[in-house]
Amino acid sequence: DAGVIQSPRHEVTEMGQEVTLRCKPISGHDYLFWYRQTMMRGLELLIYFNNNVPIDDSGMPEDRFSAKMPNASFSTLKIQPSEPRDSAVYFCASKPLAGGYNEQFFGPGTRLTVL
Amino acid sequence: DQQVKQNSPSLSVQEGRISILNCDYTNSMFDYFLWYKKYPAEGPTFLISISSIKDKNEDGRFTVFLNKSAKHLSLHIVPSQPGDSAVYFCAASDHNQGGKLIFGQGTELSVKP
């Protein structure tokens, strides 16, 4: 299995531009999670999906952030417009079972720099 | 309001010695705890976990201890090896929250030869 795939691995953009981050979860996993890692706040959960349906988006910073999961094998996290404070590493993770205690499997992350 | 806290941002240990990483939590509803390891430019990878019905779980050189009354857990690595140098994240979950994990800030472990 290829694991969780994220693209791009690095993104540099200018303030005000739209940014789209992509994630392909592990096949067969029911849950998908988006996290953001910063020095100040560590690893924060932004949003998670169960069977393509958003369950908890309470971690999404503000309306500039949106996430979609149109099918079981693809999700996007969009920032529009982007701001310098959005600079961080964004991780996608997936989990195999509904509920339960299985650990999450993380992708390699997308390092976003907003100038 | 941070529900999971790792108060030591960094730890340096000599190769062969024990590494002890600590984690505190505030939410008594957490019933499952995990440790993740992260190397630079990679995503976190699962290391070891423990259910709230246990107080110890061991896997090779790694042992996690849970003290529910103190809301504290720790990860012991014995003996420490240079390849263990990484950032270690503690995470907690409540099974009623669909597998959602709350992470600590991380502790950067450096194992010196």
Image (cartoon, rainbow, N blue to C red):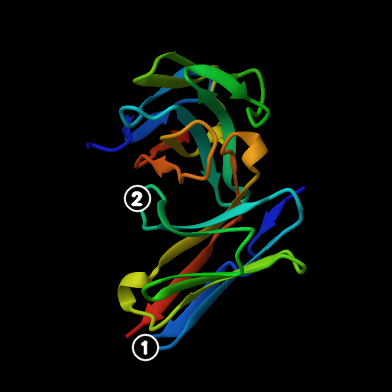
| Residue under the image location 40 percent in, 42 percent down | A106
Query: Is B72 left, or right, of B15 in this rendering?
Result: right
> Which sits earlier in the primary sequence, circle 2 or circle 1?
1
User: Which chain letter goes with mark 1?
Assistant: B
Q: Mark 2 is on which residue type? A: Ala
Per the rendering, the mark at residue B74 is: none
Of residues A13 and A36, the one nearer the viewer is: A36
| Residue under the image location 38 percent in, 84 percent down | B79
Of residues A21 and A52, the one nearer the viewer is: A52
User: Which chain letter goes with mark 2?
Assistant: B
| Residue sitting at the far front | B53
**Labelled pair 2, 1 in contact (Cβ < 8 Å):** no
Question: Quadrant of residue B25 in the image?
Answer: bottom right
Query: Is A82 left, or right, of B24 in this rendering?
Result: left
Q: Which is closer to the viewer, label 2 or label 1?
A: 1
To the question of a shared chain for discs 2 and 1, the answer is yes
Q: Mark 1 is on which residue type? A: Gly
**Rendered view: B63 above or below A54:** below
Where does the image place residue B59, in percent across and percent down from the top left? 40, 69
**Rendered view: B45 above or below A75:** below
**Rendered view: A60 above or below A68:** below
Per the rendering, the mark at residue B16 is: 1
Where does the image place residue A31, in percent across and percent down from the top left? 47, 29
Per the rendering, the mark at residue B41 is: 2
Q: Secondary structure at mark 2?
A: loop
Dot 2, crowdedness within 10 Å: few (<14), some or many (≥20)? few
| Residue under the image location 52 percent in, 76 percent down | B11
Of residues A114 and A6, the one nearer the viewer is: A6
| Residue sitting at the far left | A1
Residue A66 visible here: no
